[in-house]
Amino acid sequence: MTHESTAVGLASAYSNATTASGDWWRDAVIYQVYVRSFADSDGDGIGDLRGVRSRLPHLARLGVDAVWLTPFYVSPQADGGYDVADYRAVDPLFGDLADADELVRAAHELGLRVIVDVVPNHTSEQHPWFRAALAGEPGARERYLFRRGRGADGSLPPNDWESIFGGPAWTRVADGEWYLHLFAPEQPDLDWTHPEVTAEFDSVLRFWLDLGVDGFRIDVAHGMVKADGLPDIGRGAQATLIGAEPLPFFDQDGVHEIHRSWRRLLDSYEGARIGVAEAWAPSSERLALYVRPDELHQAFNFRFLNCPWDPAAMRTVIDESLSATTAVGAPTTWVLSNHDVVRHVTRYGGGPRGLARARAAAMLMLSLPGSAYLYQGEELGLPEVSDLPPASRQDPAFRRGRRQQIPVPAGAPAPGPAAPGIIAPRPGEPPTRPGAGIGNGPEADAGPAPEQPLAPQAHAPTQPQAGASTGPAPETQGQTGAGPAPEPQLPPQANDPTRPETGSGTGSQAGGAGAGTRPQAATDCGPAPEAQGQTGPEAEAGIGPQAQACCRPQAETGAGAGPDLLTAPEAEGQDGLRDGCRVPIPWAGAEPPYGFGPAGSWLPQPPEWAGLSVAAQTGDPHSTLELYRAALELRRAMPGLGAPGAGPSPDPSGMRWLPSPDGVLLFTRPGFACTLNTRPEPVELPAPGRPVLSSAPVETDGRTVRLPPDSCTWWAF
């Protein structure tokens, strides 16, 4: 018979002991909100804090424990908000400080904790400190990494370091000195040996903790300390080495004292406030150092995200991850997608096969000991949008132009900046901020619909398992559109999104007042191979800190071309295609913007997303959304899931592998078993218990089971 998995009558939220205790973070499911693309409240086509607040009931009903918000601070938006000009204020693009306060309070009322980004490796070039440094204020440059250049006239960069986004990691300023920026030139690196830097970030953390946030995701947590002397690396394509080899600008031992200091600060507040490291390290053992008992609480496990659809590789990554974190008494984190990588539906092959594997991988992740992170829209089974027109892309790595370096001829006076504290602008660079009001054109949608109660389901779904939960569902309110709108015309400088997981991550577009543009290389790059739903090893491999590039922009030629654009060899770095995972998510309606907001969206949404919206999937027992809802409900209800070490087991992780056929993973936790069939055909084996949830229909007679291809099944015993 075909088993109809059930998740009816499960325990309520916070049923796990660790969730109700001060160690809530050890098995929490944390949902990443990419603020710019979640929900728009004011019709400018860009998500904002009020929009996030209006959709919190969806997250509460989904069953997550906490929300991680990407940067919403005052920023010129050269890198999607990871270039911060004021760490204590909300950028008007997203609202104001009152909106942030109300969002935190509303989340807490729904039982959701709130984690916000902090960006300590670098500031914006528009930060008062950096403006003072360029203006020649005494001592101001000591807060950053300014150095004299090499060569007789200092015209060569101080070392051979490369920007993660491509090109040199150094930019020369008007008086001939160079400053370090491991990411965009608009993101100068701070010098963490300076006591004012340490004191400032202690103050910033206290500001947001006092407002009530529950913790911080620490951007580039591995990058604040550089090796003494800033030594050369001696090879190019350095972005490909991140997380694979030791580098003098990442994962230096000195970062750990910073994190110990922050842990003491976090522990001084009530309510188990946490720190989460976005850290790349060459090994699981090095990564585990960030979560020692006196350091941070969690560190992202990118090895799991990068793991191909291969059972042996998956088991190796799981074992090594659990071993490393168990050795320091910390939980392991698991993640499949985020704002910097190709969505895992597409990474796993795209189409029906990619979706089947993505659903199975999500169930595997949610059954592992530790904490899990979900990226917005993965609960809808969204694929990567691989056909965005080049004009709409805003990933700063997509336009690999660099700022014009200002040579200082020997014996000649240094050219002065165009304005106090500002690097000389490029020709034709507008002084205004881009972004507000960019959209798909006029729409009839009225914006996010009010939350409405959903009638209890009278049946238990087969694959997704909706369960019996009830609650507000804004997504059930269908919205109508006025038809496809014209493609948005974006300002040429709309450099929005963030960087790779190695970099600063997330964001929104729109520059701050006075923010300039960056030159754009002329190119018609199409979607990268991994973003086209291809098959084969390349498509099945995870995308790490450096996604494969489809092609690289060449320097422009002809009228208007400037010497500040890089040729392809100089532009080695990120592929710049991260916009495809940042397209605003669909809530309801038959046409764009699918309830994202009253008007359009800053990136165009595909027409086929109407069937993937929250409203369209709610109540459908076979939908990916109902699968996630059921899995999260079961995760809370079953005592053997979630918390490391839950229940009696000789293994501290509470997990034990059992023999299984080739292509199948089988492990148990107290009272629970999980099977993952990675093969393209069904596999028969003895039933390890009673099936309670499956990503695809399971045939069982109670003694044996026929596992569907590319599927995961949960069992109780």
Image: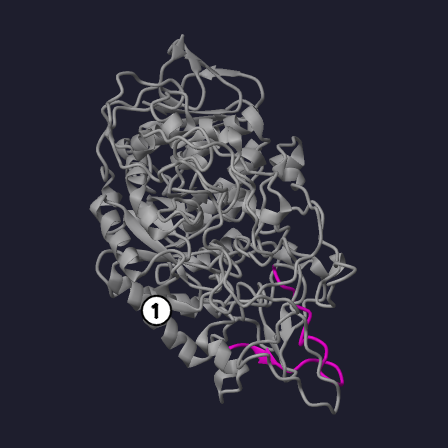
Instruction: State whether residue 231 is above or below residue 629.
Output: below
- The residue nearer to you, when weighing 543 against 183, is 183
Does residue 155 belong to the magenta stretch? yes
The image quadrant of residue 555 is bottom right
> Would you call the spot at circle 1 few (<14 residues within 10 Å), some (14-19), or many (20 or more)?
some
Q: For the magenta stretch, what is the residue range?
A: 143-164
Please tell me which residue is depicted at 71% across the width and 83% down the height of the picture: 408
The kind of secondary structure element at disc 1 is helix
Please tell me which residue is depicted at 36% across the width and 45% down the height of the picture: 30
The image quadrant of residue 473 is top left
Quadrant into which the N terminus falls? top left
Residue highlighted by disc 1: 204
Instruction: State whether residue 479 is above or below residue 528.
Output: above
- Asked if residue 577 shows in the view, the reply is no
Quadrant into which the C terminus falls? top left
User: What x and y, as percent, mark residue 285?
Assistant: 50, 54
Does residue 121 belong to the magenta stretch? no
Tell me the amino acid under the disc marked 1: Val
